[in-house]
Amino acid sequence: MHPTCLNFPAQARAALENETLRFSLGTMKTGFRRNRATAAGALPEFEALRDAAAAVRAHVLDHLDACLDAFEAKVIAQGGHVHWCRDAAEARETVLALCQAAGARTVTKSKSMIAEEIALNDHLQAHGVRPVETDLGEYIIQLREEPPSHIIAPAIHLRKEHVADSFRAAHAHLPAGRPLDTPPQLLAEARAVLRDAFLNADVGITGANMLIAETGSVVIVTNEGNADLTRLLPATHIVLASIEKVVPTLDDAMTVLRVLARSATGQDMSVYTSLASGPRPADDPDGPSAFHVVLIDNGRSALLGSASRDILRCIRCAACLNHCPVYGVLGGHAYGWVYPGPMGSVLTPALLGLENAPRLPDACTMCGRCAEVCSVRIPLPALLRTAREAAWSRALVPPGKRLALTGWHLAARHPSVYALGARLGARALRELARRPALRALASRLHRDRAPAVLPVPEGDTFRARWAQRLRASPSLHRSPPGGPHA
Amino acid sequence: MNESPPGPLVGVFVTCLVDLVRPTVALATVRLLEQAGCRVFVPGRQTCCGQGAFNAGARADAQALARQVITQFADVDHVVVPSGSCAAMIRVHYPELLADDPEWADRARALAARTWELTAFLTDVLNWDAVDSRFDETVTYHDSCSGRRELGIVDQPRRLLARVEGLTLREIAPEPAQECCGFGGTFSTTFPEVSQRLAHDKLADVLATGATTLLGADLGCLVTLAAAAQRQNAPVRVRHVAEVLAGLTDGPAVGEISPAPGP
């Protein structure tokens, strides 16, 4: 999809006015947070597992080249193919060429964030290949031509009435009067429609939760089983994976899996955890005869050498989104691209360029909850601050904000100026608080909007009152009385 | 009777927001420290801890302000701050901010090690809870994010509040209690509508407790939540925990205009 991150402030305001979104996000927060807390609380070694998973992911980043080479060699040895793609365009062309070589007209897809990142569906569609999303949430937003609003719950912003409307519009061959009022009715219809797609697809495209270097396997996790029908029924299975998805061993993959679902949905494990390890052996009647892994860099190698490299540890559990207060009131679309919430506010500017998403690192109150729940202990607030430092040094901060902060910092370094400014400021704020008309005028003069809060000072500043007290009682300490070791 | 040995020399870092908006908090801090037997010193030229600069990405400004604070508080045994986020700035972030500065790294670490949020200092360092105050209200308590996550402050203010006569504490539900109030420093001016929504949601959790007074230890949060309460005419007043502990609750609550002009 075309990024609209530059419009984040306006998109954020629009999101706040969306009552449906408000309802959905309220439910989302409550459920995901409760479930994660329960799952984490039920496993005594959960915190140690997070450490272990973080260590696995950090090790991968230190040895990414070796892990990927080993993975490639194993896949080839098992009869599969590996395609290295530098960027989104190369990845799109590679996948299209593979689909065309397979004579594909319909491809089924299971959920893949990297496919969203490279905007694969539009490209396939434009070249006569029909992609059908098979994850229920992805299927719904594909019908609605919307981007995902959450990395594991892409249709979290919708209610069942929206889904019913979309199904009636898309499934015109079904009786118009059929009931579509309950989730089971909607699910049954999606299941029937998707079953046709599964059986008729020429190619199946999946993402990858992990790539295992030791075994040349691709780990795919779903709750719906759609990835298995996607990868096993067509003759060709194409796996899309960004390069950092690799882990060294099967044991490492199990460590990550043990924190992944618990952090994401609060499940001990997702319902389906599948390992795909190449095309089917000659004596196996089931499975694809061709197995392709498309490894996509798209900015990761550069990111590996940057101050933001720790974001590449991310395993896409979405715990940071689920616990972020800002995501919790905005949802994903406001962020303007594929990855929302804290991990997205780090990753998006890193991949698209900070100049194309300069406000995303600011979309954070620094409350620290994301770091508290991150399954692989990424220091997200610190990474967001690093991005803000880059924005400050590259003059990507709005001029008004920069001027105000620079003035404040300058005053703060000159205590006499500061003291005078604070007294005048306290007086001005009090006048504003006392005079509603003046306050209204001030907010009109403030071109965009009044700040959220104009504090109401009690009276004069503390320093002025303290100075009076010192004058009145000379016995009080003007300076450290004799120092600490007197 | 022998004179007891002099208490520790404590420098109060007032914080810019307390200085500007709510001097009572600093006066309450001084009173509590004196009650706890400390010798109190308030450096007169202190300004801002640099947290705003640090979080805005203005690293050089933050470093300059950090050096200024380190110098101003070089001669005290402890630095006490009536704010979790400013205390965390000094305690957690100064050492990392100046880690590569050979001249200042040790001094930053040394200051960090003796800097405390007020309620943590009274309980954890002094093991003092001889609170002498009365507050006949049902209160609830907002744990600010920095205090909770960066300094681990949850029990300390509650231990002290338990000693206030007449006070009843009703807690916010456990999950909402962990949610940010929406202030976030410059976040509140960068995204005012988002900030207000978060404050509004937080206030709903506060009101659900039935408390008539909301207490906390970070004035940024308190100003934000007081403004949210006033926008909605919500029946809750807001005060800093130090005011209640020190018995300085005769004046207007946070965000209220005093009837008489200040001195």
Image (spheres, rainbow, N blue to C red):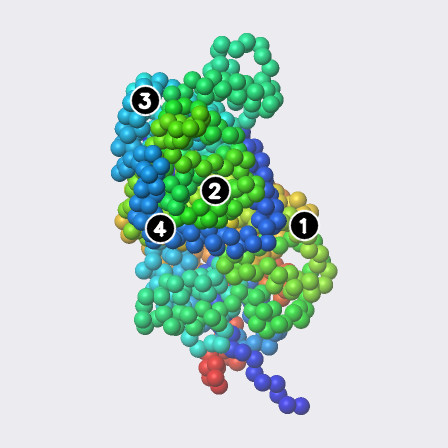
Task: Please tell me the numbered disc located at residue A405.
Answer: none
Q: Are marks 3 and 1 in contact (CB under 8 Å)?
A: no
Task: Please tell me the numbered disc located at residue A317.
Answer: 2
Tag 3: Cα neighbours inside 10 Å, few (<14), some, or many (≥20)? Answer: some
Q: Amino acid at mark 1?
A: Ala
Q: Residue at x 61, y 85 (%)?
A: B4
Q: Nearer the viewer, mark 4 or mark 2?
A: 4
- Residue beneath disc 4: A61
Tag 1: Cα neighbours inside 10 Å, few (<14), some, or many (≥20)? Answer: many
Tag 4: Cα neighbours inside 10 Å, few (<14), some, or many (≥20)? Answer: many
Q: Is residue A300 left or right of residue B154?
A: left
Q: Amino acid at mark 3?
A: Ala
Of mark 3 and mark 4, the one earlier in the sequence is: 4
Tag 2: Cα neighbours inside 10 Å, few (<14), some, or many (≥20)? Answer: many
Rounded to the nearest angstrom, the CA distance separating label 3 from label 1 is 68 Å
Q: Secondary structure at mark 3?
A: loop
Of mark 4 and mark 2, the one earlier in the sequence is: 4
Rounded to the nearest angstrom, the CA distance separating label 3 from label 4 is 34 Å
Q: Amino acid at mark 2?
A: Cys
How far across and how far down the image is residue B226, in percent? 56, 49
